[in-house]
Image (cartoon, helix red, strand yellow):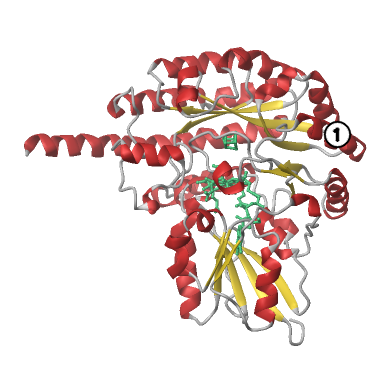
Amino acid sequence: MGMGKRSVLLVFVPADSGVDGPSLLGESERSGILQGLKDGVLKNVIKRAQFAIPPLSLMILGSVDEPGIEQHICDLRFESFPLDRSWDLIGISVQTGAVKPAFELSALLREKGFRVVLGGPYVTIFPERCRAHGDVLVIGEADEIWKDVLADLRHDRLQKEYRVRELPDLSLGHSVAKDVLELRHYFTTNVVQTTRGCPYSCDFCNVHVMNGHKVRHRNIDDVVREVESFLEKDRRIFFFLDDTVNADEEYAEKLFRELIPFNISWVGQATTKLGENRRLLDVFSRSGCGALLVGIESLAEESNRAHHKFHNPVERQVACIRAIREAGICVYGSFIYGLDEDTIEQAGAIETFLDDTGIDVPGINLLRPIPGTGVFNRLADEGRLLHDRNDHDSFRFSWGQEMLYRPKKIPIETFIPSYTALTKRVFTVKQAIQRAAKAPTLRGAVLMFNLFYVHMYNLSRKDLSRQMQELAEDKAKTSDE
Ligand code: B12
Ligand code: SF4
């Protein structure tokens, strides 16, 4: 540590459920040498299939230059907390799925005399619930305000709260450096965001709540320079973390056309509308796009409308997905089964759709009502949440675990078996191999991802069958009374 420099540690906390969740590796249930060997192989597949990428938020903060301050990142998915050093300030990123472990860590550190600053999506949406758990709160996108925090730390005048009044202007061109990262921990360290904000208002999502409805762009030159500098340290695949990488088609076409000469390969998230823009599709494919995640949600138009998702007409989906795959790009199709107008017929419809489109990696999710979203408040008002609306820890919101609410048109006792039967049919080793064989590119990754899901959906079925039992017991109890 440099003489007299103040040191800041930025911490990423794993969620205790979902993609990071160790409980989902099912360790406690297994024993024996053979089983141990199988677990070892499986764990390896799972580790690699998790495609662990670094937290961009902390990379951004860690790249803010303030004289007299040095910053480090600690990613608790891979390393233990460096308690042996004295930190002048510790920043924790709080995501809604990991509030409890984040607050527990904060309490432990404060007990040891460290000062803790909390920031991130959960703090932005629920600052009042966080106030008691940190010494300093940063509310909002911290790209610019973090410099004020660091300057105040240097001058011993830290305030209790920093609130971002105006969403940061991304065209100001703050560059992101990787000096604070341990490159070898990750599947890749090439994570880039080109835009922020979403013009849509899907009621199950909180991106538009946190980042606003206006799409803010970075300068194309800045992104191109970032890609170039990232390549110097790491030549692996790029993840574009934009919520919709084709939200502004003109911008996307210009940007990715400029990236063609770099010969990278990349993945991102897009709307299927891409399939209707041949020119953009061609530019995506030539710039190295290997796979795109698309949110299909429900195949019942009324359901998507009930959840304020209007921009993805169902009747155009099949042709669009086929066009994307024909351009040599794999499609990860994300569904939510159990939306408000869904009936039991949806299960069969999803299967037929998978066959018709040849989707390379399907994700069949349960609706996870996230505190702070429209759907959460509505379900709470309608008495359909299965937990107290104020108990946010109960809303572990990964995909495919236990139900958190009652579907509107399907009794929960019918819905759960219908969902588990569907995932049992869709996620088999045989289908994983078949999907990989037919994938337009990235076959190894498609295989790994599908195998990972065979395992994860298997575990989710265990959670759900436990929940079915509990529901039956509750019913028996209430009818006894
Ligand atoms: C990439 C990604 C992931 C990656 C990497 C996670 C990460 N946090 O970096 C992985 C796959 C691991 C992941 C996992 C999960 N994710 Co995720 N993810 C994303 C995605 C697509 C991009 C994240 C990103 O880099 N954004 C860009 C950065 C710059 O924005 P940011 O993270 O919000 O950071 C800014 C501010 O929040 C703030 N800030 C953030 N941290 C800190 C810390 C301090 C100290 C300070 C001062 C400020 C600060 O300043 C940053 C700069 O402006 C977002 C969607 C989105 N648009 O953000 C979803 C999103 C964040 N994820 C979401 C969810 C639900 C999850 C999971 C809970 C799913 C699960 N159960 O498994 C887990 C939680 C994992 C965890 N331990 O936190 C939700 C909701 C999060 C929330 N409301 O808290 C989002 C918004 C998507 C959605 N609408 O559903 N995710
Ligand atoms: S789900 Fe996607 S399209 Fe809908 S509001 Fe969220 S980010 Fe926007």
Is 345 above or below relative to 151?
A: above
Nearer to us in this view, 314 or 102: 314
Left or right, 302 with respect to 360, comes to left
Residue at 73% x, 52% y is 169
Amino acid tagged 1:
Lys
Q: Name the outermost residue toward the right.
A: 261
Residue 331 can be seen in this image: yes
Does residue 37 appear to the left or right of 321 in the view shown? left
Task: Decide if ligand 2 comes within 8 Å of the CB at mark 1.
Answer: no
**Relative height, residue 296 to residue 95 (above, below):** above
Q: Residue at x 57, y 57 (%)?
A: 120
Image quarter in which the N terminus is found:
bottom right
| Foreground of the two, 366 or 195 | 195
Q: Residue at x 73, y 61 (%)?
A: 181
The percent coordinates of residue 81 (x first, y second) are 57, 70
Between residue 175 and residue 144, name the one nearer to us. 144
The C terminus, quarter of image? top left
Quarter of image, res 244: top right
Pinpoint residue 75: horizontal percent, then vertical percent. Answer: 62, 61
The residue located at (55%, 27%) in the rendering is: 429
The x, y position of residue 76, in whole percent, is: 58, 62
Q: Nearer the viewer, residue 166 or 368?
A: 166
Quarter of the rendering containing residue 168: bottom right
Residue that badge 1 annotates: 254
Determine whether 331 is above or below 22 in the image.
Answer: above
Image side of residue 443 versus residue 429, left or right: right
Residue extending furthest front? 165
Residue furthest to the left in view is 481
x and y, in percent, of residue 399 in the image = 48, 38
Is residue 300 visible to us here? no
User: Which SS class for mark 1?
Assistant: helix
Q: Residues within 10 Å of mark 1 (few under 14, many from 20)?
A: few
